[in-house]
Image (tube, helix red, strand yellow):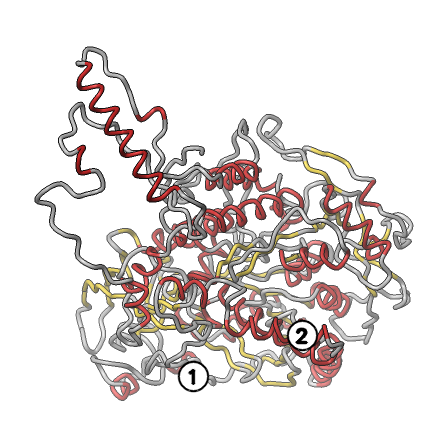
Amino acid sequence: MESIRSCHHPFKTTEEYAPQPSTSEPCGFRIQRRSTLDHPLQPSKATVTHRKGKRKVERAVVLASLVLCATFSFFTLGHGVSAAPVVHLPNPPSPPSFYPFIERQGQAPPGTPAPSPTIDPCTTLSQVEEPDISYEHVKRCYEHVPFNATEAGIVLSTLYALYRDYYVFLDYAMMPDQPKPFTNPPVDLLAGLDKISQTDYKSDYQFHTDIDLLVNRLNDAHANYIAHCYRHYLYIQPFDLYAPVIDGVQSIRIFKDDQTGFLADCEVVTIDGYPALDTIQRWVDANYGISKDAGVRLNKALSSLSFDSNTLAWKLTPGQYTSRVTLPESASLTYELRCPPSRSYPEGSNQTLKVDWKVFRLVSWNEFKDTETFLTQNCYRDTDPLLARIQNGAEEAEEHGLRKVKRMLDERKYTWEREHQAAVETNRHDTIKPIGKKRVISEETGSTLTSNKDGPSSDEIHEEDMVSHLVRRQEIDRPVVTLIHNSTHTAFYQLVSRPSIGVVVIPTHSVQIQTETIGLIEGFALLEKAGVRNVILDLTGNGGGYVNFAYDLVDWMFPNNGTSSSDVTSVYESDLRSSMSVKALAHADLMNDEYESYYNPGSYSDPGTGQVHETNFFLRDKMVRRVPGQQQGGRPQDLTEKVFMNHILGNFEMGMPWQHQPARIVVLTDGACGSACGMTLNRLKNRHGVKSYAVGGRQHEPLSLFSFAGASVYGLDAILNDFKVLEVDSPMQGVRYKGIYRVPVMEFYWEGEETPIEYNAKMYAADVHLDYEPTTARRHELLWEVIAESHWTDKLADA
């Protein structure tokens, strides 16, 4: 069996996975050899070394001890193959020249105390509830789960094939020196998997964590390795943090304080002894791959307001740094605070607080009693109680021809999978028991309502007429907008101070197209009727959704006059991977009239003729090496010819004052506008010349308007299902661990550009970068006034 080298947290530095010429075999082959039947305790020939100058008697004693040791190992451990996880131990050291206890092989030397019985730490964790669950409880349990070489081999070989054959940016991920606003290191994904395959892991937790960190370094929200096994607890700090600019200087400050109730807007100078802003940036760069722009990643690490379509309110969303589902690095954080003068502290105050993480069980948590049942109840798909019942019911229904029952059970399975996808974002999590009394943000004003624990009471704060040390209530309580209309997700407003300016809040592209279209027709018509002539499209926090809605939003602003709605068109030229397994899927799909996968050639058309493909264009592929500077270490990639993804273009010509008028349209985001949302803003900004604003990020640094714009995402389970239905041999196995395993499979191009949009950095930076202030961070609508005064300076624009 190959030796395995120890490697701890190999993904923490930028240089670790810079592309290097690969001389090793593919990861998948190495994994197969790793799971041989050689026993891990069997001594190798290299263990016994003949020392020159030693007496022959000593040499004979040493050899005799090794023979006895090997014999004992064979008869006690070597018979048969155990189904338990294989624990790889380091090679035993060379024995000393004289071993005095040869006759006591298998027994402890005299005087050795008897080992005390140990308690399974997962048993301990299973017996505690909130508020008694501690960081150490969870950490000990996680680290006690043994590394399973068999399951790890399946995971790595499957991921290797998934990325090798389907990940469309496998080569571009290795591109060095990406220009601003990108701050993305080159990542050789296959080399990273190969390195993980050579690591001697002791715990299953560390194995999954290292893969997660590797994939995070891609900074592509469409590429995910999220094993839910170690994401069933929520870890929170009592502070919500943000990074406003005050007096020309950006700093980390407390947005909301659940610990004492009176530390809002105190400056966080250091965290664990290091500058706070840089500490948070380093953490999010390693742990949260939402964007290739460090400023966008910082926005997601910090707390912010997001729009709730149900209540039509901007509500506080916890930042990833202080509200996590992944195990923190330590049991507590130490904050050095500098608070401005206040009623309680007229001269200001400096203080240092060491705060433990509070731990809560999430609704995805299942009961367990020890390490074994922790795995079966919370980690494995085939033993998950709810999923197993759903799956068994679906199979039984199919056997008996009960299609309606099977459809219902399939929908329940889909719901289960969607609920478990909540592990991606902490703010969507529900805990089994309430987190406790927390201050809330007023739905009307965004102001602080109640305090918690010690310190000045909420009445005292109200008497001071202060929301925080820096924000007076009158600054955020005044009326800013009037609600004109709202659909299922989208809301339409009119500025009070500038009635000719309307605001359309679009928090998601995951909408029911027909329903939302009706809402858009009504909302835009009511805006015009109210006298609106200019519109701000606010897509803050919009993480994407359906591609058709992305195209439709552009068509609402710039209708395609004279184009029949029956014409088949597309916004972007695209290409896909054309590996051998993809070719086989495409061929089988083309022959199957009852099934359509992502790789059905009929889903695409020829950009030159507009004709739908009726033959397998995946066979007309080309092998290219596209990344500059990677001629030696880069990877050639098989890609299809350029195609259009078919789309039925909508016709939304309504004669609105802003249609076809880029000067009357403005867009606003926090840079997290991704996927389909990014496709919308890319087209509005770069094709139609709409002015763009992005808020947050790092001061004096350009900030992306959108992220991961393009590249449709496809999950491992969906690909495996394609192979199963189309009866094609798959190069991958199913992963036993519950989780989200996805890759982008299509890349989009701008007209005349050879670099895909995903890596075309010059298209991303917003025209105007806005910094948060304490007032605009607490009252999002105030940003609309700032933009209105900035963009429509001429009052004649109101006419």
Snapshot quadrant of residue 623 = top right
Q: Quadrant of residue 99?
A: top left
Q: Nearer the viewer, residue 781 or 124?
A: 124
Quadrant containing the C terminus in the rendered view:
bottom right
In percent of the image, x 75 and y 59: which residue is there?
725
Disc 2: CA contacts within 10 A as few (<14), some (14-19) or many (>=20):
few
Total numbered circles? 2
Q: Residues under labels 1 and 2: Cα distance?
A: 50 Å
582 in relation to 445, above or below: above
Residue at numbered disc 1: 442
Q: Quadrant of the N terminus?
A: top left
Q: Residue furthest top?
A: 53
Q: Residue at x 50, y 73 (%)?
A: 385
Circle 1 packing at 10 Å, graded few (<14), some (14-19), many (20+), is some
Quadrant hosting residue 44:
top left
Instruction: For the residues labelled 1 and 2, say whether their Cβ atoms are less than 8 Å apart.
Output: no
Depth check, mark 1 against mark 2: the one in front is: 2
Give how far across and how far down residue 473 sits, in percent: 37, 82
Check disc 1 and give the amino acid type: Ser
- Report whether residue 799 is seen: no
* Residue at the spot 61% in from the left edge and 71% down from the top edge: 391
Percent coordinates x, y for residue 149 in the rendering: 45, 47
Question: Which one is nearer the viewer's eye here, 475 or 565?
Answer: 565
Q: Is residue 396 left or right of residue 771?
A: right
Dot 2 corresponds to which residue? 396
